Amino acid sequence: MLTKILSASHFGLTPNLIEVEVNVFKKGFPGFSIIGLPNKSIEEAKERVKTAILNSDIDFPNQKIVVNLAPADIPKEGSLYDLPIAIGILASMELVKLPIEKSFFYGELSLDGGLRHTKGVFLLGLAAKQKGIKSVFVPSESANEASVLSGIDVYPVKSLSELIAHLNGLKKIEKIKSSKYSVLSTEYCSVEFDFAEIIGQESAKRAMTIAAAGGHNIFLVGTPGAGKTMLARATAGILPPLNEDEALEVTKIYSVSGLIPAGEGLIRNRPFRTAHHTTSLIGLIGGGTNPHPGEISLAHNGVLFLDEFPEFSRGTLEALRQPLEDRKVSITRIAGSVNFPASFMLIAAANPCPCGYLGDPKRECICTPRMVMNYQSRLSGPLMDRIDLHLNVPAVDVNKLIANSEKRIAKNSKQIREEVVKAREIQNKRFKGLSFYTNANMKNKHIKEFVDIAPEALVLLKQAVNTYNLSARTYFRLIKVSQTIADLSVAEGGERSRTNRILPNHVAEALQYRVRNE
Amino acid sequence: METKTTEIKTGKTKKKLNYRGEDPNNLIANSIAIVGSRQMTRYGRDVVDKFVCDLVANSITTISGFMYGVDTEVALKTLEYGGKHIAVFGCGLNHIYPPENKKLYDEIIKSGGSIVSEYEDNAKPSMWKYPQRNKVVVNLASLGVLVIEASENSGSLVTAKLAKKAGKKVWAIPGPINSRVSVGCNELIKSGDAKMATAAKDIAECQIINDKLQIKNRPELPKQEERIYKILQLEPLEIDEIARKTGMRIEETGTTLSIMGIKGLITESGGKYYITI
């Protein structure tokens, strides 16, 4: 008898409806075959399904079984077809009654008949919403991913036997309650470093605050041990939590990549991704025959930290240019073209020269001028031009610091984070209804529309353009950074101004972080 | 480009020399060799600017070794102020080394200066040729040799020694005693091998035009700028230290520094701020 079970796969971030057709023949030589372009992991589903059914105290039929994954021309991968295949076989043998309304079955089986955490459940939920399918049966460990979507019934399934009992009406599985998204801005995630732990480096901390508040890309140059890595890592602790739309975007990508831990639902903490300089181009940008998101997409709405920036291969670095500008990346393979969002804040760190000590007051730089030139030329002008804040992180004299450290009380990450959260709220209000959330993502037309700049500030800006020969792109970058500084000063509440107008002092501070071409 | 040959005096004998551009013999009546570190500091740059300006204004030809750092800076500044420069190569004239200076090479010839070498045109650059080249540098310099910045055991000290041997005058610019690239200069002054020079008129009868490094009066500044200015007069500092010393907030410090930069009061280099007037 033939049975059809519905399930979903995904290509990039788009869900596809898959029909799993199972036929258990009355006649024919016993066998089990799966067709419809399965890959190795689906081929192996035979053994998992067979053993799981046996271990659920049901005899596996000694008959010819054919499974077709339709549409048959799309290549399929992953372990998610285990459950639909098993249910299909059981339904064909008339051992279970399929629900009357259309339902999705999804999940990997364990040999003991239990269901394992499976990636992509969030996308399955989205597919169900789009296609108007009411109930979805998914592994209980992954069920929370889909529970944030309203309008669908999510049944958390622990094991095959539990599902059989439910379908036959013996013992119902309680559907999961949909959890509403709530932001607890006071909730604080613990991080490696607190800003208060970093001694000195006041200007660097300030620059990090501005970058975090406006989502600006930042480039740190300094000698080894100056604290670049520490500053970058501490930045994870001052990022605001994700708003609801952002959280859904991030969860989608993480669900596809299988990075949502078992039992977890929506991702609420802003992603902070670090990539080593040996990371391949595909690993960073995304790709593969069936395209997978790379680090830049995993850092979507969050931070991507690239330490030892010039050590990345030239090709990898230049590949960053387009996503940095477009805030998304298009990947085209034989199977088709995929768009992954990649709106991330880049923190890049580098030494001033190969040995690292150029300009250090204590240690001699052993590089020849040629070596320094080669090293610095690895970072192309167009790439540097896409970074809003450029910062020198000098090595600090430890003795000087200890002597002076008691005089000033450094703000801790929690305090800074509150200011950043307030500044982001201002921006969320400003860009309501648009497809972006931060000042850094403003295009020139948005600058005209949203930015109010005082005449004196504009004069100063024009002066700076003439004095330092700034490019048009740098000019607009300065305005964006100035806007973030203005928003921060409102967030701090200390300034006389209560408006978000850009004043001369905001522009002047922004000028501190321009590209120095010397 | 055509290579010509001339002879220059080396003590009692004469030496053959290849050149392009102007015959060096026409340029060296009043000439000085300026040598120094390849890793020039900000201080070195200021000194070159000041000295070259005054020397050029008094029609003195500058001579250097066409290397990175002080050599290149001297050539650039000489051309900027409209003077004549002689670049002495440590390799054949068909090899431009360092290659980044290709533009400078053309400019020197165009401005009526000269590129010279004692090697045949296709000789490759190699380590041993450079001390050899320094002899030519010394022989061309009629006034003597000025050492701007030199670390211990540097090539510039070799040149100074050669100049002394040849009976030429040597001047050195004093520098901070804790600066790596001033150790050699200070040592030269201490041992008496070189005379101390703090202005172009120490070298030759000169009119001083460029008084950038002379301490003088400046316009009245707003309170915060004045505070920062006074601190920077003592030593160049990073923004964090400026904030610490003035007790100003980091945002304010950055703002004030930017405005002072636009006014042209200070410049920034390698993270440190320097006063310009």
Image (tube, rainbow, N blue to C red):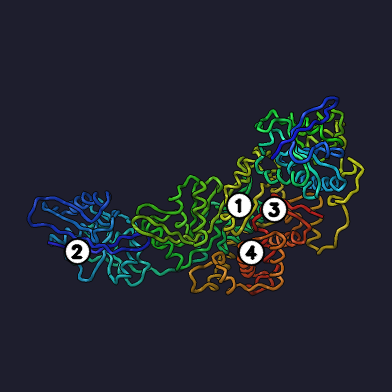
Report the Cα–Cα distance between label 3 and label 2.
72 Å
Q: Residues within 10 Å of mark 2 (few under 14, many from 20)?
A: many
Q: Nearer the viewer, residue A260 or B101?
A: B101
Identify the mark nearer the N-term, 4 or 2: 2
Q: Compared to A387, does A435 lie above or below?
A: below
Which residue is label 4 attached to? A475
Determine the secondary structure under disc 3. loop
Image quadrant holding the N terminus of chain A, namely: bottom left
- Label 4 with label 2: CB-CB less than 8 Å: no
Element type where label 4 sits in the image: helix
Q: Are marks 3 and 1 in contact (CB under 8 Å)?
A: no
Q: Which residue is mark 1?
A: A220
Say which amino acid is labelled 4.
Tyr
Q: Earlier in the sequence, mark 3 or mark 1?
A: 1
Horizontal placement of A267 versus A196: left or right? left
Q: Determine which residue is flagged by label 3.
A: A406
Point out residue A51 in the picture as x, y percentages from the top left corner. 20, 50
Residue topped by disc 2: A4
